[in-house]
C-alpha cells in the first residue's frame, strides 16, 4: 500500500463548480467594493482640498469680509430703524396729546364765545335800560325845571302880593310844602 500524502474527498463536480464560483464571485465583489470606497474617499478628499483652497482664497476672504460688513451695516440700520420707530411712536403719542389739548381748548373757546354772546346780550339790554333811564332822567329834569320856573313864578307873585297884603304871607308858606310834595312825587316816579 502506498502512502497517501494528500487526501481529497470525493465531491461531485457540480458541487465543486458551485462552491468555486461562489468563492470567485465573493472575491471580486469584495475587492470591487473596497476599490470603489477608496475611489470615493479619494474623490471626497480632492473635493475637500479644493473647497478648503477656495475657502482660503483671497476672493473668498474678501467675500467673507463683505458679508461681515453687510451684517454690521444691517445691524446698525436695524438699530437706527428701531430708534426711528420709537421716535415715531413718541411723536404719535405727542400728536395725540396735542390733539386732545386742541380739542379741550376748542371746547373752552366755544364756551367762552357763548359766554361772550350772553354778556353782549346783557350789555345791550343794560344799554337799552340806561337809554330808557337817561330819557326818564331828562324828562324828570325837564319837569323839575318846569316846576322850578313855576315855583319862581309863584315866588315872584307871592313876593308881589307880600307887599300888598299880609294874608298872602300865609299862602306862600302853604305853597312851599305843596312844592315839596310835588317834587317827592316826581322822584318816586323816577325810581
Image: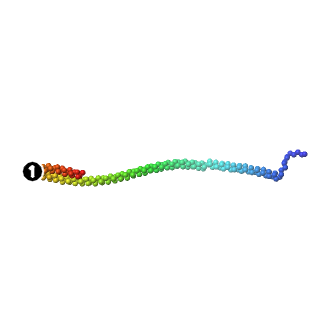
Residue 55 at what x, y percent from top left? 62, 48
Residues packed near mark 1 inside 10 Å, few (<14), some (14 to 19) or many (20 plus): few
Q: How is the image coloured?
A: rainbow
Q: Would you say 3 lies left or right of 18 here?
A: right
Residue 168 at what x, y percent from top left? 11, 50
Residue 85 at what x, y percent from top left? 49, 49
Q: Nearer the viewer, residue 187 or 171?
A: 171
At 29% from the left edge and 52% from the top edge, which residue is drawn? 126
Q: Residue furthest right?
A: 1
* Residue 115 visible in the snapshot: yes
Marks counted in the figure total 1
**SS for dot 1:** loop
Q: Nearer the viewer, residue 9 or 183?
A: 183
Q: Assign the N terminus to one quadrant of the image.
A: top right
Q: Would you say 80 lies left or right of 24 here?
A: left
Residue 183 at what x, y percent from top left? 19, 51
* Residue 62 visible in the snapshot: no
Q: Would you say 133 lies left or right of 99 here?
A: left
At 41% from the left edge and 50% from the top edge, which residue is drawn? 101
- Look at mark 1 in the image and give the residue it sits on: 165
At 12% from the left edge and 49% from the top edge, which residue is drawn? 170
Q: Nearer the viewer, residue 147 or 179?
A: 179
Amino acid at each position: 500500500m502506498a502512502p497517501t500524502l494528500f487526501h481529497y474527498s470525493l465531491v461531485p463536480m457540480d458541487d465543486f463548480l458551485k462552491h468555486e464560483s461562489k468563492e470567485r464571485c465573493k472575491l471580486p465583489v469584495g475587492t470591487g467594493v473596497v476599490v470603489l470606497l477608496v475611489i470615493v474617499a479619494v474623490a471626497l478628499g480632492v473635493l475637500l482640498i479644493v473647497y478648503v483652497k477656495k475657502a482660503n482664497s483671497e476672493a473668498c476672504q474678501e467675500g467673507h469680509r463683505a458679508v461681515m460688513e453687510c451684517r454690521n451695516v444691517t445691524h446698525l440700520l436695524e438699530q437706527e430703524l428701531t430708534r426711528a420707530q420709537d421716535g415715531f411712536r413718541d411723536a404719535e403719542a405727542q400728536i395725540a396729546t396735542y390733539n386732545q389739548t386742541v380739542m379741550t381748548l376748542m371746547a373752552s373757546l366755544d364756551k367762552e364765545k357763548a359766554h361772550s354772546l350772553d354778556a353782549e346780550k346783557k350789555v345791550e339790554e343794560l344799554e337799552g335800560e340806561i337809554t330808557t333811564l337817561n330819557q326818564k332822567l331828562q324828562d324828570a329834569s325837564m319837569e323839575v325845571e318846569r316846576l322850578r320856573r313855576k315855583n319862581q313864578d309863584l315866588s315872584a307873585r307871592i313876593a308881589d302880593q307880600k307887599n300888598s297884603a299880609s294874608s298872602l304871607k300865609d299862602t306862600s308858606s302853604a305853597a312851599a310844602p305843596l312844592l315839596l310834595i310835588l317834587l317827592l312825587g316826581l322822584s318816586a316816579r323816577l325810581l
